[in-house]
Amino acid sequence: MFRSRAKEDAKTEPVSEPADRPTRDAEAPKGRPTPKRSEAEALRKAVVKPARTRKEAAQRTKRARREALDKQRQALLSGDERHLPARDRGPVRRFARDYVDSSWHVAEYFLPIAVLILVMSMIPATTNIALLVWMAVILGIVFDSILLSRRLKKQLRQRFPDESLRGATAYALMRTLQMRRMRLPRAQVKRGEEPR
């Protein structure tokens, strides 16, 4: 009894669409074009959902740390200032690196000379010569380090009068102890060039 009347009312009354509803394009029935798969995936990745479990949060943290370390390693190889570690960042540190890389230093040959001295000290006939070479290398490193630190401090004071120069000399001296091709960040200037 009630059903038949409701059906009759539905047949007699026309259903009207609201006037404020926008008309749709025949090619884009949703009102917008369908995004490409690559765009949709990029959008999905950009929207970061909160972690549901501790394990998922730890995985995300580990992944983020790994990505940051990869960027840092690439920056150390390429010299990109944005992703360098804090100890290598800034114009003062860049100048100290370039100052060291632009000239020869005794300390950078310390490891190969130390191996040579070790081999010489194993041969009984060359033990005394090994000791003399050892003393000469140590004195050469000390003398070269004193000259380098004095010259570098003078240059840094002239070029960066308002910046903090704390630790820049020790940073440069530690860089001289590394062989040139093993230095990180990589050398950006050739020997004999002016530091940037």
Image: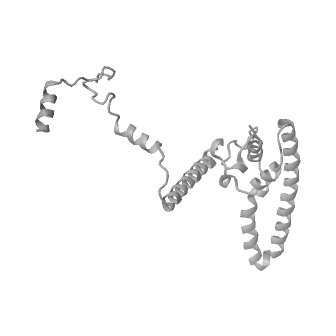
Which residue is depicted at the point 29% across and 22% down? 23
Q: Nearer the viewer, residue 47 or 154?
A: 47
Q: Quadrant of the C terminus?
A: top right
Residue 191 location (% of width, % of height): 73, 44
* Number of disc labels: 0
Residue reaching furthest to the bottom: 124
Where residue 30 appears, as percent x and y from the top left, is: 30, 30
The vertical placement of 26 against 155, above or below, is above
Q: Residue at x 83, y 36 (%)?
A: 159
In this rendering, position of residue 135 left or right of residue 81: right
Identity of the residue drawn at 24% across and 24% down? 26
**Residue reaching furthest top?**
19
Report x, y in % for residue 47.
Answer: 46, 43
* Figure colour scheme: one colour
Q: Nearer the viewer, residue 176 or 51?
A: 51
The residue furthest front is 1
Q: Nearer the viewer, residue 25 or 2?
A: 2
Q: Which of the 4 image quadrants contains residue 32?
A: top left
Image quadrant where one finds the N terminus: top left
State the image coordinates of residue 157 (x, y, percent, origin top left). Answer: 87, 40
- Camera-side residue: 187 or 109? 187
Residue depicted at 80% across the width and 71% down the height: 130
